[in-house]
Image (cartoon, rainbow, N blue to C red):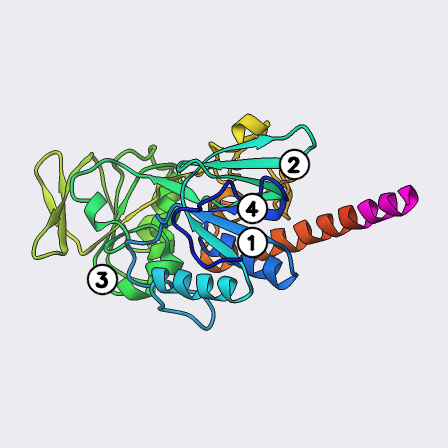
Amino acid sequence: MADTQKNPSSQAGLDTALDVVIVGGGLAGLGAALTLVRARRSVVVIDAGHPRNAPAAHSHGYLTRDGAPPLQLLTWGRAEVRGYGGTIVEDVVEGIERRGDGGLVVSTRIGARYTARRVLVTTGLVDRYPDIPGMRERWGRDVVHCPFCFGWEHRDQPLAILGAGPGAAMQALMWRQWSDDVILFQHAAPELSEEELARLAARGIEVVHGEVAAVEIDDDRIVGVRMESGETHARSVVVVGPRFESRHELLGPLGIRTVEHPLGIGEQVEADPTGFTGVEGVWVAGNVLDVTAGVMQSAASGVTAAATINANLTIEDAENAVQAARED
C-alpha cells in the first residue's frame, strides 16, 4: 500500500474490499491502524487534517512522550503506520453506506469511494464553550479545560474558573490542587448549593456572581477577566468546562444512536466498551466513544477496537473458508 495520499487516482477498494477503513487519523485512529496493519490487515486511514488539540503546544500524560507537541505525535504515528504498509489519505469523508452484499462504502469529498469489510470511526469531538471575546484565540494556550493536561503548566498562577454548567464548583475544587489563587466566576452556571459554597469557602476559593463580558489580553497573554458590570479581575489563566459533542454525523444514517455522557457534559455514540456500535461492521473509538478520553485513553481505545475488529474478521475469514471448502 502507498504512503500518504492527497488525491487518490482511482476508486480505491471498489473491486476488492479493504479489511478496514478508519475515518479519522488522530491517536485513536492511528493506534487502531498500527494494530491492524501489524496483524496484516489491509487498512486505509482517511483524515481531514484538523486535530482538536492542534492549538496546544504540548501533550501531557502520554507515557514516554510527555510534553511532545500534538502534531509531532501524529507525525510519528503516521510514519509507523506507513512503515507496515498502511495507507493514509488526506481527505474528508462525507458518507458511509451499506452495500447490498453487507459491505460498507466510504465516500469522500474529492469523489473517492472505498469499499470495506469493517469501518472504524475516530472523528473526535467539538468543544462548545461560551462565546466570550478573547477566548477563542487563546484556546489550548491559557484558556484551558483539563487539569491533567494543563494543570502542571499553570500551577501557582491566578486562575479564573468560568462557570458554564452544573460542574463549575467541582471544577474549581479540582483546580485548587494546582493553585491557591482560584476565583470561580459563576457566569452561566446554576446557583450553587450551600454545601458547594461551604466547600469552596473552606478551600479559599472566591465566588464572583454576574456574567463575564470578555477575557482581557495584553502582550499576547491573558491579564484579566472583565465582568458585564465593568469590574475587572486580574487573572492569568481561564478554565472553562465546555460541552463536548462527538463528531457523529456520519453514523446517524446507519441507525447508530448517541447518548448523553453519564456526567451530563456532552454527547457521545452509544457503543459497547470495545467500540462496537451494534450495527454490523461499524466501530467507534476515541472521543466519539468517550468524550472525556485524553490522548492516552484515546490511543488505547483505538487499539481495543482494532483487536476486536481483527477477531471479528478472523471468524468471518474462517467461516468463508469453510463455505469454500464445502463448495469444492
Q: Which disc is residue 141 wearing?
A: none
Report x, y in % for residue 83: 51, 67
State whether the magenta stretch is mostly helix, strand or loop: helix
Span of residues in magenta: 318-328
Amino acid type, residue under disc 1 in the picture: Gly
Q: Which disc is residue 103 wearing?
A: 2
User: Which residue in the structure is indicated by mark 1?
Assistant: 302
Counting residues from the start of the chain, the first of labels 1 and 3 encountered is 3
Looking at the rendered structure, the secondary structure element under dot 3 is loop
Instruction: Quadrant for residue 42, please give it.
Output: bottom right
Counting residues from the start of the chain, the first of labels 4 and 1 encountered is 4
Amino acid type, residue under disc 4 in the picture: Val
User: Which residue in the structure is indicated by mark 4?
Assistant: 21
Amino acid type, residue under disc 3 in the picture: Gln
Give the CA distance from mark 1 to mark 2: 21 Å
Q: Which disc is residue 157 wearing?
A: 3
Taking depth in this image into account, of 67 and 239 the one nearest to the observer is: 67
Res 316 seen here: yes
